[in-house]
Image (cartoon, rainbow, N blue to C red):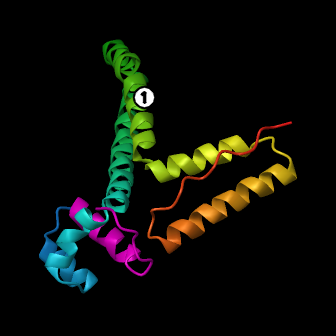
Amino acid sequence: MDSAVPPRLLPLIHTAVEMRFECKTWEEISQRVRRRARTCRHWPLRYPREWNRYYARLRNSYLMDHCREALGYLRKHMHSENPIISAAAARHWDKNCEKLFARCEAADQKADDPETQKVLRVVEQTKGLTDGQLAQVLEAVLEDLRTRADSNGAGTPTPAPPERE
């Protein structure tokens, strides 16, 4: 079950995600956001898209911070006066850093939910369109958003942009 998150609830959910990321209990979260613990406990189930997206952002930020720190130490060791340490650090860099950056990019792409990917595809398709064609695409997107807002997210998909002349 993935409901649309009411705008007034979004900051509370983000606070709850941050606190869960820091291993806080539901009771501690409930006190902070002034909701019952049972209510907070159901947010990941009721709003999984927003919960998972924000949690993934926090996780990626946490990992990138630690990665930057580790790379700083690795760079320091690559410039060591001791050739053995310098060579070992360079080998480690060659062996592991490319894989690490590839994993981070893959995680960033996975963090984008289907709605975000859909919007990015529409934006990519609109490049090079005339003003008239762009207006048609934007009208179709607005109509899609209106339909989904009226029917709680069960609207028709956004049509593809018109063919270029």
Residue 83 placement: quadrant: top left
Of residue 90 and residue 22, the one placed in the foreground of this image is 22
Q: Which residue is drawn at the image coordinates 37% and 18% (left, top)?
A: 86
Percent of width and height locating residue 55: 32, 56
Work out whether 95 lies above or below 157. above
Q: Which residues are magenta?
A: 1-21
* Residue of label 1: 102
Amino acid on which the number 1 mark rests in the picture: Ala
Residue at x-position 42% and y-position 28%: 102
30 vs 59, left or right, is left
Left or right of 61, for residue 138: right
Which quarter of the rendering shows the N terminus? bottom left
Query: From what the image shows, is residue 81 above or below residue 62?
Result: above
Q: Disc 1 on helix, strand or loop?
A: helix
Q: How many marks?
A: 1
Q: Choose between 140 and 41: the one closer to the eye.
A: 140
Q: Position of residue 24 (x, y in %)?
A: 17, 67
Instruction: Name the residue at the bottom extreme.
Output: 34
* Closest to the observer, 127 or 145: 145
Q: Residues within 10 Å of mark 1 (few under 14, many from 20)?
A: few
Out of 42 and 72, give the one closest to the viewer.
Answer: 42
Q: Residue at x 36, y 17 (%)?
A: 95
Q: Could you tell me if residue 132 is visible in this image? A: yes
Residue 14 lies in the magenta stretch: yes
Is 122 within the magenta? no
Where is residue 54? Give x, y as percent.
37, 59
Looking at the rendering, which quadrant does residue 126 occupy? top right
Name the residue at 41% across, 34% down. Answer: 106
Residue 82 in sight in this render = no
State the image quarter where residue 140 is shown. Answer: bottom right
For the C terminus, the image quarter is: top right
